[in-house]
Amino acid sequence: MKKFLSLVLTAVLASGLLTACGSKESTAQPEAETSDNAQTEDAAAADAADNAQAEDAAQADTADASQEEQNAGELQVITVAATAVPHAEILEAAKPILAQKGYDLQVTVFDDYVQPNNVVEEGDIDANYFQHIPYLDSFNEERGTHLVNAGGIHYEPFGIYAGTESDLTNVPEGADVAVPNDTTNEARALLLLQDNGLLKLKADAGINATINDIEENPYKINFVEMEAAQVPKVLSEVAFAVINGNYALDAGLNAQTDALATETSDSLAAQTYVNVIAVKEGNENSDAVKALVEVLKSDEIKKFIEDTYQGAVVPFE
């Protein structure tokens, strides 16, 4: 009996030990699962951090691009009306220099001498570049505009060009000679013809001369008056033509190489007829206009003019 009880007690103790071992195993398993979960959470946090860094980088790139666009848009626009040659060409050469100074130069090309003044007077365009001071003054007086000279840039020697005749010392009687019909350019043409012995003006005519001021006309020249831009187009129909420098260039003519005679650099005309930047009165002292004039009078642009036009256009000092 005692032996039987001893066996029973041993069996109970063994069962308790097995139960205790089973309990340790079951509590160890959740600890392993907790460790795995922690690793998963750490990885998720790392991914979130990486995503945040990527978003920050993307936002920085966007901010940089936006700043670049803003900087590009900060260039102040200057609009200028001009005739094609040489004025628009000179302005194109000035564009990159003005961009460095913070200005976006925009050029509109016209083929006449009236509209460039009208659009500046009306405020549609900031400035123009095509005319000399006598023409500017005459335009203001005749049309009641309020345009002023903001700075002299260059002058273009007028030239007498051969049409059906090529000898200024042997002009046929009654020869047709084409000249510009606007007051100031006609006076300039007549002064050049006088300098070359084709006529004589009244002593006090000067830069306001018209054909009515011709005192002597030994060759009985017939003066064909027309809009300045049209003069080169009739060259084959007249004995001679006196052509503005810019319109000569536009027609493929160079005053220094193609003209029979030109204004000299020390002539009254050359000193008087400097081409200017013109603006509406009150705008001549704006920062933009001052920058435009400064660049057009710079050494870089002077060199461009000298190299490009070889004396057909001369920088104004």
Image (cartoon, rainbow, N blue to C red):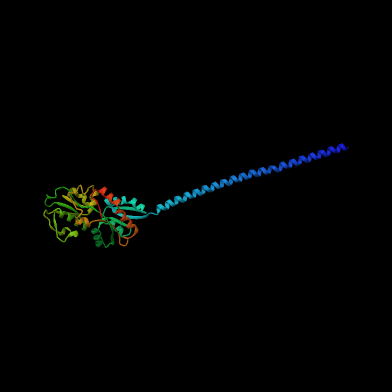
Residue, far right: 1
Spot occupied by residue 250 in the image (x, y as percentages of width and height): 25, 49
Residue at point 82%, 38% (across, down): 10
Is 96 left, or right, of 275 in this rendering? right
Residue at point 86%, 37% (across, down): 4
Is 119 left, or right, of 208 in this rendering? right
Q: Would residue 125 be seen by someone viewing this image from the given angle?
A: no
Residue at point 52%, 48% (across, down): 53
Tell me which corner region of the image, top left, top right, bottom left or bottom right, holds residue 77.
Answer: bottom left
Q: Would residue 177 be seen by someone viewing this image from the given angle?
A: yes
Q: Along the line of sight, which residue is nearer the eye, 105 or 222?
A: 105
Spot occupied by residue 111 in the image (x, y as percentages of width and height): 27, 52
Spot occupied by residue 279 in the image (x, y as percentages of width and height): 30, 59
- Image quadrant occupied by the C terminus: bottom left
Residue at point 60%, 46% (across, down): 42
Tell me which corner region of the image, top left, top right, bottom left or bottom right, holds residue 29.
Answer: top right
Q: Along the line of sight, which residue is nearer the eye, 259 or 18?
A: 18
Spot occupied by residue 160 in the image (x, y as percentages of width and height): 18, 51
Count of numbered labels shown in the rendering: 0
- Image quadrant occupied by the N terminus: top right
